[in-house]
Amino acid sequence: MTAALRVVVVGAGSMGKAWLRTVEADDDVELTGIADLDVAAAEAAAAELGRPALPVGPDAVDLARSTGAEAIINVTIPAAHHPVTTAALLAGFPVLGEKPVASTVVEGLSLAACAELTGKLFMVSQSRRYNRHLFAAKAQAEALGRVGIVSVDFFKAPHFGGFRDAMASPLLLDMAIHQFDMARFLLDADPVSVLCEEYNPAWSWYAGNAASTATFEMAGGARFVFNGSWCSPGAETSWNGAWRISGEHGSVLWDGDHEPTLDVDAQEAGDVVRPETDPGEAIAGSLREFASALRTGATPMGEVHANVMSLAMVEAAIQSASLGRRVALDDVLNASYEAALAKESNEDVLRVLKSWPSVRTALTR
Ligand SMILES: NC(=O)c1ccc[n+]([C@@H]2O[C@H](COP(=O)([O-])OP(=O)(O)OC[C@H]3O[C@@H](n4cnc5c(N)ncnc54)[C@H](O)[C@@H]3O)[C@@H](O)[C@H]2O)c1
């Protein structure tokens, strides 16, 4: 028996409440307080959780210190990810943060350097990785020989109201990072370049472009094709998307909600080894991996250095759509690195950034 990991959750919005329920349901984690700039929102969340006496406050670090927490779970809005996580790491707290790592790759690089500086774990929760069907699809893909194409269709028709209806690239900025990150996981490969088109169907209820097609060249030569829309009623796909993995001896199909299927030439196929690990489900899975990483020292899937590339895919896709040409991921990473050096206000974090031989090397260490 090990003692439960004591945590403060910061950000008591809609996703914060989901995290609070998940933390409460996990016997290995103990909630010591809820922080939110809007303290009334934190109080309301504590009451909703059935724990009205739980300590609350506006500042995550102050609350973590006063309640004896060992780690902070950051579920604030993307613009607050960088300041809140930086303050937590500098105060000595490991952080589990909601996706995206930060609102820009520039800020993501600063956070990676800050994690190095402090030696504290910063893990980004990409919740859709924690899915046993996704793990099974990856295992089945091992039987296909060389894999050359991974494609995903994502067609949904949500009426969110609020900020998503008004933003410039709602699908690419707010949703596609999930599928981009899942493709990196399935292929065990990072992106090289992308050609992307964004558009808004005539009937769209979004102000910005709600549909997009992006083709990524991945390291090793495989292509990942994302084809999606957030204004497509009828025959909607799973929120995970509908996937096809195509290799030299066959294909894997996954509808995003059920077991994947393998269609392969029996003569040529390799063995399908069932995944040994159960990844758990969504944020409960990432919480479990975070707590376990802190206990064992293992590096979790979403460690900040490994995660930044998923946000870089989003920025590269948006850049490609606006420029109307293929964009190299290295160009996005190098420009972000230069901007991070110019913008960094913490001298110690700047020193770490300057010590990197290259961004790619730093991110794949
Ligand atoms: N994994 C998923 O499937 C998924 C789904 C939805 C949202 N998210 C992510 O969760 C995060 C939160 O989204 P949400 O929908 O809950 O947002 P929200 O706007 O509902 O809530 C955010 C909360 O953070 C608080 N906050 C903002 N800045 C703060 C600061 N500096 N210090 C303390 N509190 C601060 C706000 O007062 C608000 O209560 C985002 O990063 C979003 O992308 C992930």
Image (tube, rainbow, N blue to C red):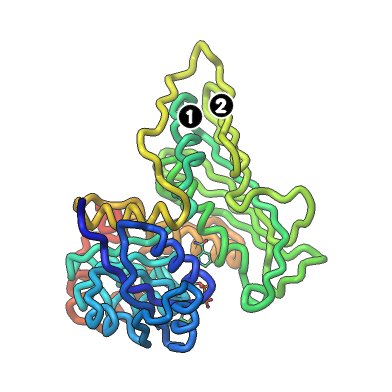
Crowding at dot 1, Cα within 10 Å, few <14 / some 14-19 / many 20+, comes out as many
The residue singled out by tag 2 in the image is: 262
Q: Amino acid at mark 2?
A: Leu
The residue singled out by tag 1 in the image is: 140
Quadrant of the image occupied by residue 150: top right
Outermost residue toward the right? 203
Outermost residue toward the top? 267
Q: Is residue 284 left or right of residue 200?
A: left
Label pair 2/1, CB-CB below 8 angstroms:
yes
Between residue 47 and residue 208, name the one nearer to us. 47
Residue plotted at (19% across, 73% down):
92
Residue plotted at (25% across, 67% down):
94
Query: Mark 2 or mark 1, which has the lower sequence index?
Result: 1
Quadrant of the image occupied by residue 220: top left
Quadrant of the image occupied by residue 323: bottom right
Residue plotted at (76% across, 48% down):
235
Between residue 277 and residue 128, name the one nearer to us. 277
